[in-house]
Amino acid sequence: MEPIKLTGWSDFPNALEEIKTKQAARVNENKGRALDAPLFRGLGNSEWNLETTLERSPDVAAGAAYTLLDYYDKISRTQPVIESLLGTSRPDLPELPDFKKTVQAIGRSMRDIKQGIDSNLYSYLIYLRHQGFPSPFLDW
């Protein structure tokens, strides 16, 4: 991976255009085959590991391993507390058994899971991350 160092947000648009130009040239070189999108990270030190807040959480640091279903179980159990503390309500989220059936039905690849999960759930996961809840999302 080729790091590109920027001095501030004002450099970002030009760097992004340069990346898009290089990406288009690579697609042409690969006879139109799709390529993975570029990765971006916004950490202060390129030596730091890419870790989600979930990976940095005390549970995981103590050796716990989370599957998607484990994580959903955790957010399902905390949902009433979060809703009462923040004055929100999310009745549109699936119950854990329904979510488990969905995950089992759609396959194991992340692409399948992303396509099979309801946008209301994504919205809630993003909301939780914004509120500081440990998340499998990687901020950049």
Image: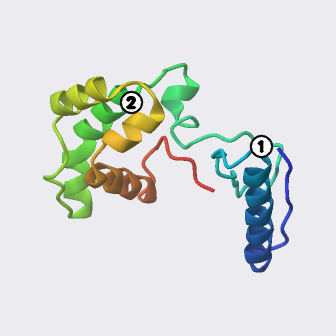
Task: Please report the residue visible at 80 percent of the width from the left and 68 percent of the height from the top.
Answer: 18
- Name the element at disc 1: loop
Residue 6 at x, y percent in the picture: 83, 67
**From the viewer's perspective, is 43 left or right of 87?**
right
- The extreme left residue here reads 91
Q: Is residue 79 left or right of residue 122?
A: left
- Point out the image quarter for the C terminus: bottom right
The answer to whether residue 81 is above or below residue 110 is below
**Which residue is located at x 16 percent, y 36 percent?**
95
Q: Tell me the quarter of the picture where residue 72 sits.
A: top left
Residue 66 horizontal side relative to residue 43, left or right: left
Residue 97 % position (x, y): 17, 27
Residue at numbered disc 2: 68
Disc nearest the viewer among 2 and 1: 2
Q: Nearer the viewer, residue 105 or 87?
A: 105
Callout 2 amino acid? Leu
Residue at the extreme front of the image, as rendered: 31
Question: Could you tell me how far apart the alpha carbons at marks 2 and 1 are, in whole angstroms?
Answer: 25 Å
Q: Is residue 26 above or below residue 105?
A: below
Q: Where does label 1 land, which residue?
A: 48
Residue 93 in picture, x, y percent from top left: 19, 47
Q: Residue at x 51, y 38 (%)?
A: 54
Q: Quadrant of the N terminus?
A: top right
Residue type of the residue flagged with mark 1: Trp
